[in-house]
Amino acid sequence: MATLLTQREAADVLRLSQRTLERWRVQGTGPRFVRLNHSIRYRPEDLDAHVAALTGASFCLNLSNCLTMFQFPFVCGNGLLVPPDFL
C-alpha cells in the first residue's frame, strides 16, 4: 500500500498553506487526492506529478482555465497562450 500524507504533511512538502490545498481541491486545480471517509490524503507521487505538470508554466495552468478566462479559444501549451491558427 502506498504512503498517504495528511493535508498538513502535503502542505509542508509543497511549502504551501493548508488553505491553498483546500482551495485548489475545490477549484480542481491541485494535486490528485484520496478521500477516506471524511479524511483527505495525498500520495507523494501525485504531489510530484502536480509539481512536474506546473514546471515551466507561467500563466495558464490548464486548458479549462484558458477557455474560461478568454472568450475565444486559445490552446494552452508550455504555459503560454497561443491562438489555435498559430500552431
Image: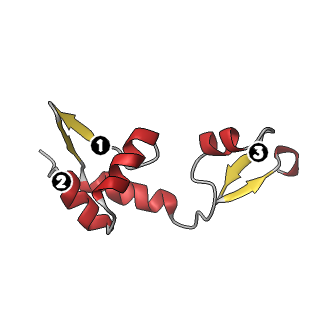
Mark with earlier residue (3, 2): 2
Label 3: how many residues lie within 10 Å, few (<14), some (14-19) or many (20+)? some
* Marks 3 and 1, the one that precedes in the sequence: 1
Residue extending farthest to the left is 1
Residue depicted at x 81% and y 39%? 72
- Would residue 26 appear left or right of 33 to someone viewing this image? right
Residue 74 disc label: 3
Q: In the depicted view, which residue is nearer to us: 10 or 84?
A: 10
Query: Between residues 46 and 67, which one lies in front from this camera angle?
Result: 67
Identify residue type, mark 2.
Answer: Leu
Q: Alpha carbon of mark 3 to alpha carbon of mark 1: how far? A: 29 Å
| Residue 52 screen position, x and y as percent | 45, 61
* Residue at 57%, 67% in the rendered image: 56
The residue that label 1 is drawn on is 33
Q: How many marks?
A: 3
Q: Is residue 64 left or right of residue 45?
A: right
Q: Position of residue 33 (x, y in %)?
A: 29, 43
Relative side of 75 to 54, left or right: right
Q: Earlier in the sequence, mark 2 or mark 1?
A: 2
- Vertical placement of 69 versus 18: above or below? above
Secondary structure found at label 2: loop
Residue 15, how many percent across, how many down? 32, 69
Q: Residues within 10 Å of mark 1 (few under 14, many from 20)?
A: some
CA–CA distance between discs 2 and 1?
A: 10 Å
Q: Residue at x 32, y 65 (%)?
A: 14
Using the image, tell me which numbered label, if any, was put on residue 5: 2
Position in image of residue 75 (x %, y %): 73, 46
The three-letter code of the residue at mark 1 reads Phe
Q: Residues within 10 Å of mark 2 (few under 14, many from 20)?
A: some
